[in-house]
Amino acid sequence: MEPLTATAILTLAFSKSIEKASEKLTEGALQKLDKLRQLIWQKVRGQGKVEKALQQVEQGSESDVQPVVTFLETVMERDSEFTQQVQNLAQQINQEINIETEQSEATQNIFGGEGYLSNRNEGVNVQGGSGNTFNINLGSSKG
């Protein structure tokens, strides 16, 4: 699995959209999300403008994201233990969010001009290293 960028990690941990997704996360994933936030806050505390920017990001400010991202990138370059911790947590949370999204009620795939519709997604999601996604749906009907 490719490492997530500082921007992706920050977005996962603090964006308002994660609040909607968190309604469907397991207790374990929510604990990981809290731990991810704590790890980031531990590095940001006492960093003046960056700390204030992260407070604004938590309130939904998109214009304050860049100073925090720049700071996180620097920390992640210098602190391999921190990087490993946040990468592991973020990837686990991201994986759970992706699994939840894949369990939708209907899936439509179009291959070579032919459409296939499955009213119940009982498929398996396979993702290659280059980001290609293949949906294999069981019991789908031609539509």
Image: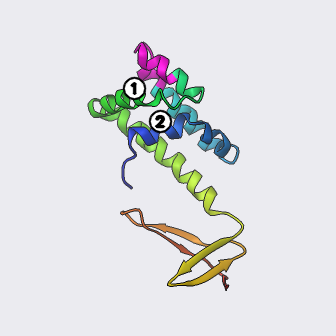
Q: Is residue 38 left or right of residue 6?
A: right
- What is the x, y in percent for residue 96? 57, 52
Distance of mark 1 from mark 2, alpha carbons? 11 Å
Q: Secondary structure at mark 1?
A: helix
Going from N to C along the chain, the mark reached first, 1 or 2, is: 2
Displayed quadrant of residue 99: bottom right
| Amino acid type shown at disc 1 | Pro
Q: Residue at x 37, y 48 (%)?
A: 3
Q: Point out the stretch of residues depicted in magenta.
A: 41-54
Amino acid on which disc 2 is placed: Leu
The reply to whether the magenta stretch includes residue 43 is yes
Q: Nearer the viewer, residue 92 or 137?
A: 137
Q: Which mark is residue 67?
A: 1
Q: Does 50 sit above or below residue 101?
A: above
Asked whether residue 122 appears in the rendered view, the answer is no
Q: Which residue is mark 2?
A: 10
Frontmost residue, 84 versus 142: 142
Q: Quadrant of residue 72?
A: top left
Does residue 102 appear left or right of residue 47 in this picture?
A: right
